[in-house]
Amino acid sequence: MKNLKIALLQLMPKDTIDGNLQKGLEYCRKSREMGADIALFPEMWSIGYNIPADACELMSKAVSADSAFAKSFAELAKELEMAIGITFLEKYDPMPRNTLCLFDRFGNGVLTYAKVHTCDFDDERRLTAGEDFYVAILDTVRGNVKIGAMICYDREFPESARILMLKGAEIILVPNACPMEINRISQLRARAYENMTGIATVNYPLGKPDCNGHSSAFDGIAYRPSDSCSRDTLIIEAGEREGIYMADFPLDDIREYRSREVHGNAYRRPLKYKLMVSERIEEPFIRVNNKNILKDDND
């Protein structure tokens, strides 16, 4: 596979789930006309990342992974012969999840990922967190590619992308809903660099509260034999306006780079990292709204 084209759908949401369904379908068709292999939505597109404060209203807005909303994108993926990464508030017990479903060009669901690092300090504290990170082999018209996913706040934990790299991910999809400024964009650049993976992030445009566009893609290739110094791994950074922004990943080059460079899993020493799996949290990182915090038995 020489290249993989991902359409970053930096779109302004509508006020209803049906409105987002219809607009989403329309822009998937436009993406296919532009040559996309994958169309990717920003975080929780079904409700435009508008999380109700009331628990009953929140649950009423959730849709299942086999709902008409999700199935519509599966059917369109098959029709267009293009993969679609659709995001939605997923109906789940005991509370909904923040979920991405990736449908391949045959309309099959090949990856379902629920956000692991929910923002428990904000509106997402009422959501059910995901259990793990997953990688799937995606069959595209250009060939197979190993795809992983993380969502928004997940990117702020190096472990998210690291686990996906260890599971074989070549490209990581990142639906997003927050201001993308220099530090958050730098996080994505770092995740691509240290794991030698491509990373495609799509955000809501300016005008959506607490969002500003700047969807981005990085190929992770920091060095080329023909270059005398390192290079910027940035493929594209969108502006603030609504639109489709095409990220063209040089997949053959990424694979060749991963086969020879020093990052990723080439020289890691996992036995030295045992502290990384400790669940204890100590000052100054104690947060009373952390649902997973472990305290001393004597506390």
Image (cartoon, grey):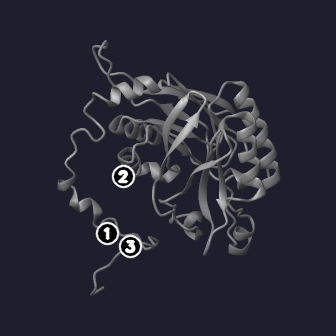
**Left or right of 4, for residue 14:** right
Quadrant of residue 272 in the image?
bottom left
Q: Report the mark closest to the observer, 3 or 2.
A: 2
The answer to which of 50 and 247 lies nearer the viewer is 247
Give the amino acid at mark 2: Glu
User: Residue drawn 45% across and 59% down?
Assistant: 132
Q: Position of residue 101 (x, y in %)?
A: 62, 51
Q: Is residue 95 above or below residue 30?
A: below
Q: Which mark is residue 293?
A: 3
Secondary structure of the residue carrying tag 2 is: helix
Front position in the image: 81 or 165: 81
Percent position of residue 286, x then y: 35, 69
Query: Few, some or many C-alpha atoms within 10 Å of disc 2 (few <14, some 14-19, many ≥20)?
Result: few
Please provide percent x and percent y for residue 268.
22, 44
Can the viewer see residue 215 in this picture? no
Residue 193 place in picture, x, y as percent? 36, 34
Which residue corresponds to mark 2?
A: 159
Q: Nearer the viewer, residue 92 or 58?
A: 92
Q: Which residue is mark 1?
A: 279
